Image (tube, rainbow, N blue to C red):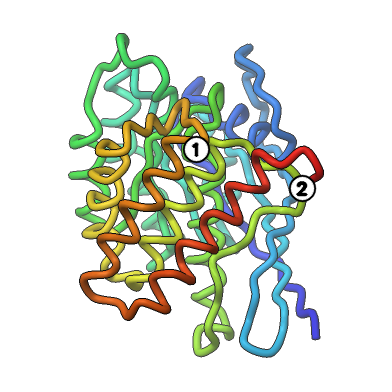
Amino acid sequence: MVVEIKRKVLLLGDGAVGKTSLIRKFVMDQFDDKYIASIGTKVTKKVINFKLKDDELNLVLLIWDILGQSEFKGVIGASFYGASGAFLVADMTRRPTLENLKKVWLPRVEEVAKELPIVFLGNKADLTDEYAFREKDLAELADTYDAPHFLTSARTGLNVNMAFYRIAYDVAKKGKFVDKQLSYPIPEEGRLTLVEVADWIMYDFCSEKGEKNFALTMPIVREQYERAGLDPRNPTKETIMKAVKYLAETEAIYLDQESVEQNALKRLKMLKRAVSKNV
């Protein structure tokens, strides 16, 4: 049986942090580096599939790209009602955009929506030479709210799918399906990019350990990615295969051999979708 539900997710942050480009990359796999000053809000729809124990769940994610200008406070506040989750987006090349998450956007979320699943994003992560703050600064803010964080790039696709799948997973778990076992949302059928595969493997490893341990397991994946020479911004087939091997060695410490092998095969199957010419 297929169950369909709709959930509203907010994309919040100052103007020109790249919110619209993130949506384009996730929904249409397009990137436009020309900033368009939004008037009001823009709503984009994306369907994400979850596997349940006995059913399938199609989550219709209604992504609200909220105006980034603070002078439109009344319009922005009205847009928050009915939301099930929110992204807080900062521009890695502009420190004030991080400070405004604390001073402007988070207080507004707390005014109208208590206990909302939140994901923090540091966008434009590909512009490493222009960083105005570091990932640890974003991580410290996210930890204050017991929330995950990702460095993203709408240009390269770094962590874009992973971030949206994470908010979708958190939103779905807040609903009536909380007592059912939700799988990590599988990307749509078809050819995947190597960046998407690297993102998916990272999330798959972390989610295997449970949501409470996500922040603890993410550094483990990064360590094994570095060991494999895997650059998340530009992964190769060879470095992903090495990373899968190293992650399997890590899991062998606390999982039985059958589970280790199943996880490795699952991850290599995702890699095959990226490199196969027959997909």
The N terminus lies in quadrant: bottom right
The C terminus lies in quadrant: top right
**Horizontal side, residue 8 vs residue 178: left or right:** right
Given the image, on which type of amino acid does mark 2 rest? Gly
- In the picture, the disc for residue 190 is 2
Is 168 drawn above or below residue 130 in the view shown?
A: below
At mark 2, the secondary structure is: loop
At mark 1, the secondary structure is: helix
From the top left corner, tell me how far across and down residue 112 is, in percent.
45, 60
N-term mark: 1 or 2: 1
- Nearer the observer, disc 1 or disc 2? 2
What distance separates the C-alpha of mark 1 from that of mark 2? Answer: 42 Å
Residue depicted at 46% across the width and 67% down the height:
263
**Horizontal side, residue 36 vs residue 247: left or right:** right
Q: Count all numbered tags in the image, as a single digit.
A: 2
Is 270 drawn above or below residue 122 in the view shown?
A: below
The quadrant holding residue 254 is bottom left
**Horizontal side, residue 130 vs residue 126: left or right:** left
Task: Tell me the crowding category of disc 1: few under 14, some 14 to 19, or many 20 or more residues within 10 angstroms, Cα based.
Answer: some
Task: Tell me the crowding category of disc 2: few under 14, some 14 to 19, or many 20 or more residues within 10 angstroms, Cα based.
Answer: few
Is 63 drawn above or below residue 175 in the view shown?
A: above
From the top left corner, tell me how far across and down residue 123 is, in percent.
43, 29
Residue depicted at 81% across the width and 43% down the height:
278
Residue depicted at 51% across the width and 29% down the height:
68
The quadrant holding residue 113 is bottom left
- Residues under numbered marks 1 and 2 in contact, where contact means CB atoms less than 8 Å apart: no
Is 126 drawn above or below residue 87 in the view shown?
A: above
The quadrant holding residue 60 is bottom right
Q: Which residue is mark 1?
A: 73
Given the image, on which type of amino acid does mark 1 rest? Lys
Q: Is residue 6 visible?
A: yes
From the top left corner, tell me how far across and down residue 238 is, in percent.
46, 35
